Amino acid sequence: MRLTPQQRHHNETKIRAAMDRLLRGDLPPGGKCDIKTLARESGIDRTAFYGNRPYVHLREEFENRLTAIRQTGERPDPRDAQIARLKKEITTLKERLIHRNETITELTDIKTEVLSRLAAQHEEIIRLRRRADQAADVHRLPVRAPVIEPRN
């Protein structure tokens, strides 16, 4: 069945309206910014956009506009923008993770060194106490009981 000029004009109007919506980023659920979605949104059979069919020029126009939009850095498909944003976020998180791991390693090394020093100081205190206990000329001072102040 051949299309009348009015039907063809009506279909082209529907296709252009759907094209504008898709290129603005107004995508239907489960749709992308592509010919398949354009055909579905305009209610035209997808095969009409290929070969020597009547709407090849509209497919080419759609693809050219889509390419021009992408070259400016915009993304009509919000999922493309979301994927780009998530990739950037993953890169940032990986860098933060590397930095955190380096910090944890440094802090673990410091902790080990501090514990070694504390153990060495404890051993030194014990050694000095033994020596003081064995020495005859060292007198211990009496230990006072702590003073407890009354509460108001």
Image (cartoon, rainbow, N blue to C red):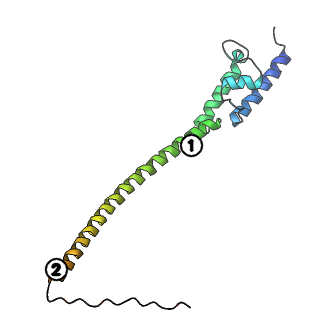
* Position of residue 59 in the picture relative to residue 8 (left or right): left
Marks 2 and 1: CB-CB under 8 Å?
no
Residue at coordinates 69% horizontally, 20% vertically from top-left? 57
Q: Quadrant of residue 128?
A: bottom left
Query: Foreground: 67 or 131?
Result: 131
Please identify the quadrant where the C terminus is shown. Answer: bottom right
Q: Position of residue 100 (x, y in %)?
A: 42, 54
Q: Position of residue 75 (x, y in %)?
A: 62, 37
Please identify the quadrant where the N terminus is shown. Answer: top right
* Position of residue 116 in the picture relative to residue 79 (left or right): left
The correct choice, above or below, for 129 with respect to 7 in the image is below
Residue lying at the far top of the rendered structure: 1
Query: Foreground: 16 or 21?
Result: 21
- Amino acid type, residue under disc 2 in the picture: Arg
Please tell me how crowded label 2 is: few (under 14), some (14-19), or many (20+) other residues with Cα within 10 Å.
few
| Secondary structure at numbered mark 1 | helix
Q: Earlier in the sequence, mark 2 or mark 1?
A: 1
Circle number at residue 134? none
- Amino acid type, residue under disc 1 in the picture: Arg
Q: Note whether residue 72 is visible.
A: no
Q: Quadrant of residue 54?
A: top right
Residue at coordinates 36% horizontally, 60% vertically from top-left? 107
Q: Quadrant of residue 35?
A: top right
Say which residue label 1 marks.
85
The correct choice, above or below, for 118 with respect to 10 in the image is below
Residue at coordinates 29% horizontally, 91% vertically from top-left? 142
Say which residue label 2 marks.
131
* Position of residue 7 in the picture relative to residue 89 (left or right): right
Residue at coordinates 55% horizontally, 42% vertically from top-left? 86
